[in-house]
Image (cartoon, rainbow, N blue to C red):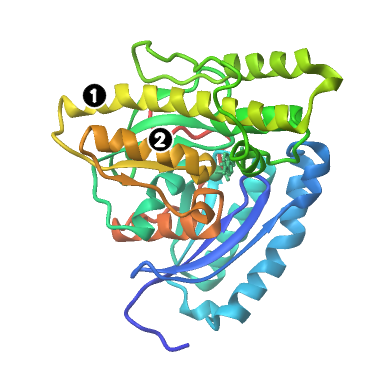
Amino acid sequence: MSKSNLSVILGIETSCDETAVALVNSEKEILGHLLYTQIEQTSFGGVVPEIASRAHLSHLPKLMESLFLQSGFAYDDLDGIAATCGPGLIGGVLIGALFGKSMANVLNIPFYAINHLEAHALTVRLVEDVSFPFLLLLVSGGHSQLLWVKGVGDYSLLGSTLDDAAGEAFDKVGKLLGLSYPAGPCLEALARLGNPHRFPLPSPLKGRRGCDLSFSGLKTATRLVIESLGSQITSEDKKDIAASFQKSLCDSLVDRTQNAIRLCLEHTPTFPLVISGGVGANQTLKGAFTRLAHTYGLSLHVPPPALCTDNGAMVAWAGQEKLKDNAADMLDFEPRPRWPLSC
Ligand code: KG4
Ligand code: ZN
């Protein structure tokens, strides 16, 4: 592959149960991407950190080799290496970070330590021309936040979850319904067949001031409905429970984001509204936010589902954003299990 004047960055993602690598250039082209989902975790109903670390260690070298073979690129074509350095399960993060740093050292190219949340936040700019500032709802398996995004590395936290993350609520309710982990996509498919009005479940914090989020009350109320049906629960009941749960969760997210929109409109006349993170793959949520954005005359931007859930391209793209800012990191950057985007 001949060198062009476009920069190419390798992205490495290992912060949870997805081992992912990708090559992305400065023209927003995904030149190659591979992802291994640790299906061995499904039998445990969640992610077991020790098993996840071992799986990253065994799959990352093979994925890397295949990525270069399949894309036709060589290590010499790289202009930088970006690896998730937190937040996440520290065993996996250490493996990806060390791998990336070693490659950057051997190839003598810049290393970009990527905040996983920032990678989710910036993904939308890989697929669309969304400029700063924008209002972001970041909803994943580990985090749920509303952020005012002013630029790369420049975030104001408007609200965050007081208890569970949105994806975690999907996974826990899905487990109670007998769905395999991660339950979000299966629960969404089940909900499509159900009646969202049959079970009146609470939409946490709806109507309350502020932009914080909460999901544990909804999760408990859903659990009580499931327990009340006991062994008599039918597949129709499960579809209706899934639909009612999803509707209440989306209603709550719309309500909390509406408060954030009003807050932001006080200082900025218009701005893009963005959803990112695994739960952003949910099409019912996207539908509800399309109506919300329309009400306030805002444009809505959501990456395609495969880029909402964890992937290597979002990490490579975050590296491209940092490269533009000339913001490479030192090789002694220490991976962090916790790494808030903003205080
Ligand atoms: O961003 P992500 O891949 O990993 C983290 O950073 O946590 O998000 C994974 C979460 C899981 O909880 C999964 O159940 C949820 O996103 N998820 C969904 C959907 N697809 C993935 N939740 C609802 N609807 C979906 N279609
Ligand atoms: Zn994620």
Q: Would residue 164 be found to the left or right of residue 58 on screen?
A: left
Q: Position of residue 173 (x, y in %)?
A: 68, 27
Q: Quadrant of the C terminus?
A: top left
Of residues 253 and 85, the one nearer the viewer is 253
Residue shown at 44% from the left, 37% from the top: 138
Considering every residue shown, the one lying at the far right of the view is 231
Of residues 244 and 315, the one nearer the viewer is 244
> What residue would you read off at disc 1?
262
Q: Position of residue 26 (x, y in %)?
A: 35, 68
Q: Which numbered marker is on residue 167?
A: none
Q: Would residue 203 be found to the left or right of residue 58 on screen?
A: left
Q: Position of residue 61 (x, y in %)?
A: 70, 66
Q: Quick one: label 2, few (<14), some, or many (20+) residues within 10 Å?
A: some
Q: CA distance from mark 1 to mark 2?
A: 17 Å
Question: Is residue 211 placed above or below 52 in the rendered structure?
Answer: above
SS state under label 2: helix
Q: Would residue 78 be found to the left or right of residue 131 on screen?
A: right
Considering every residue shown, the one lying at the far bottom of the view is 2
User: Callout 1, which amino acid?
Assistant: Arg
